[in-house]
Amino acid sequence: MTHRTSVALLLSFSLVITSAYGAPNLLSPTRSQITTSQKIVKLLERYHYNHIYLDNGLSSQIYDRYIKDLDANRSYFLQTDIKEFEAYRYEMDDALKSGNLAPAYHIFNRYQVRLINRLSYVLKALKNDLDELTFTDNTTYNTDRENVEWPKDNKALNVLWDKRLKYMVLNQKLSGNALDEIKKTLIKRFENQLKRVEQTASEDAFQIYINALTQTYDPHTQYFSPRVSENFNINMSLQLQGIGAVLQAEDQYTKIVRLVAGGPAAKSKQLKPSDKIIGVAQGNSEMNDVIGWRLDEVVSRIRGNKGSVVRLKVIPADAKNESETKIVSLTRDTVKLEDRAAQSSILEITHDNKKKKLGVIDIPTFYSNFQAMQNGDPNYKSTTRDVVHLIKGLEKEGVDGIIIDLRDNGGGSLSEVNSLVGLFIDTGPTVQVKNSSGHIMPWEDTDERIIYDGPLTVVINRLSASASEIFAGAIQDYGRGLVVGGRSFGKGTVQSLQPIDSSQLKVTSAKFYRISGESNQHKGIIPDILFPSIFNLDEIGESSLANALPSDNIPPARFKRWGNYDEYLNYLTAAHQDRISSDPDFIFTKEQISNRESEEQGKTIVSLNEKLRVKEQSDAKTRRLDMENKKRVAKGEEPYKDFEELTSANDTDSSLHERTITIDHVLTEAGYILEDAIAIRNKTQVASRLKR
């Protein structure tokens, strides 16, 4: 299809739009976007790690991704639309190379038409009395339509949206809202979405389409439009100043990806990854429904002056459906370097009937105050400098060994993780970096000093990523210590920024490899001893992301192993399993996992019968209360009287919390494993000396 034919199609189609709210502006690409798209194609072929050539195979993937990004739940396009668009499936590669963006804008403008028609339809339905809606039959609604058939016609769409409206109203009812308030909320939500459609610009269509291209290469390669590029915190990491959270857009929702250590969100202990933010309010003012908002608009509502309060309405990650919401109140603050600094504590346990002391060092991120260092400040802060100080303090306390806690550590400075590994070995490589040209460069510790040569254990979880995976992998490869906990995130790629006029392209240009030659990418670090984990690997981690680069191997670097725990692992694992089989906290974790798995089996098919939903909601609360009280009784604590007491126990403002090390059951168990390893090593050494 030629560019001229595509434009003609756009113009002819725009004439048949019928809506009480009018037609969308007919969008078309600018000259700048045409040249930018061609530059991006060349940059991807030149700089991307895999040097993927844009061909028919990739064109098909771009097409599927673009359609999905526009209508992931198959609630707008019709079968006739998809049949028409199929002509572009194997044409997008040639179109992108030549700067022909007409296919993309044809699809996007059609989407805008369908979107306006659906929003108009539901707003018309909301003008009726909601009392006419009944919730007594056995009708169900599928919340995940990614793999269902596209609606045949507008009649089929009407049936779908009638169910969708009932689903939304019922969720609001189950949250305790009156029908008149529900009507007001939903009308405002859809009217706001209509206003946003009217404000949609060519830049929005271009960014969605180009990211459909970049995301077929890998999930971390991304295009930032000029508007997004204006704000570093949004375009680089989507970090929200004020609450300390990293967000991303997912369908109609704003989802939490991770929490920034030391920030208000992390301190509150009320938010977690995969929670969805559906409402934002300033202080005690009215809650604004933000479903369907653009990410940057949600960001602007959440950000604010230090000391001010923002309230978030959230659907928890473990909620069975959208009716299970909670309000989280946070006091905005600036995340200071000292709030994210490493800290230490003493873990005391009884092992073999003897009192034992172990040091715990919590490292939330790999940081360095580069500005202070460049200014010649002899006391500048960095992860390595702080950990040296903490180790010396712990040694003065006479600890038997040290536990490095890297849970929730999303990474940071590569130079810092390199120097931190060097505190525990004499010299040698710490990580290998392979660039897009195939050149492999090892990072090495060249300082022969060893700050600590005693027993060591590293604790990781699913949110341990990038630099923290490099550290854990190096310690594991050297046999320098044990790695325990949950499987890590699996982020083993390196991104670089390529400027394009007033926009930017973040492109994956290299990969990290362990000194053993293995890649952390995709599979993450597998602990020597695996703990039960509540994290859902299908929803969190590199392996959950579409088009994530695979794990592979390169030749190992030359290094000398420190020790070998392999011969002890069977014993250490058996002792671990025996302990946690009767530990109330680990039993609770296993029950949470079992409960989540059973609920997820039918999670997307939701009943629209109010009595049944009320019962499901009550049963879920009862199960959670019973599980929590079972744990509390086993630990000698008073059980909660009811579900309300359970939930209110955690509802505290983030300003009341300072970041401190909590010696929880995971660290305690890591301590027992370390003491087991110390005892075995000591017995082995004694036996070896006796033989001599």
Image (cartoon, rainbow, N blue to C red):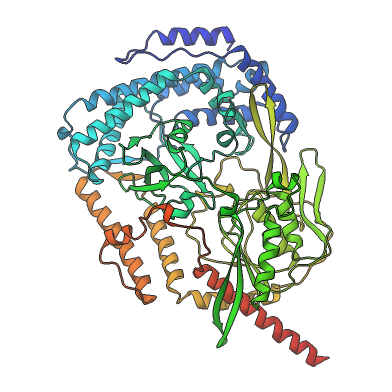
From what the image shows, is residue 229 above or below residue 537?
above
* Residue 254 placement: quadrant: top left
Look at the picture and state if 23 lies above or below 365: above
The x, y position of residue 273, in whole percent, is 48, 49
| 207 displayed left or right of 472 | left
Residue 588 appears left or right of 406: left
Please say if 95 is above or below 499. Answer: above
Against 679, residue 45 (above or below) is above
> Residue 580 location, x and y as percent?
49, 74
Q: Toward which corner of the image does residue 47 lie, by quadrant?
A: top right
Residue closest to the eye, 139 or 210: 210
Which quadrant would residue 589 be assigned to in this image? Answer: bottom left
User: In this image, 166 relative to 528: left or right?
Assistant: left
Of 333 and 10, which appears nearest the observer? 333
Q: Front-most of 325 and 143? A: 325
**Residue lying furthest bottom:** 690
The answer to whether one can see residue 57 in this image is: no
At a point 78% along the width and 92% down the height, the residue shown is 690
Quadrant (top left/top right/bottom left/bottom right) for the C terminus? bottom right
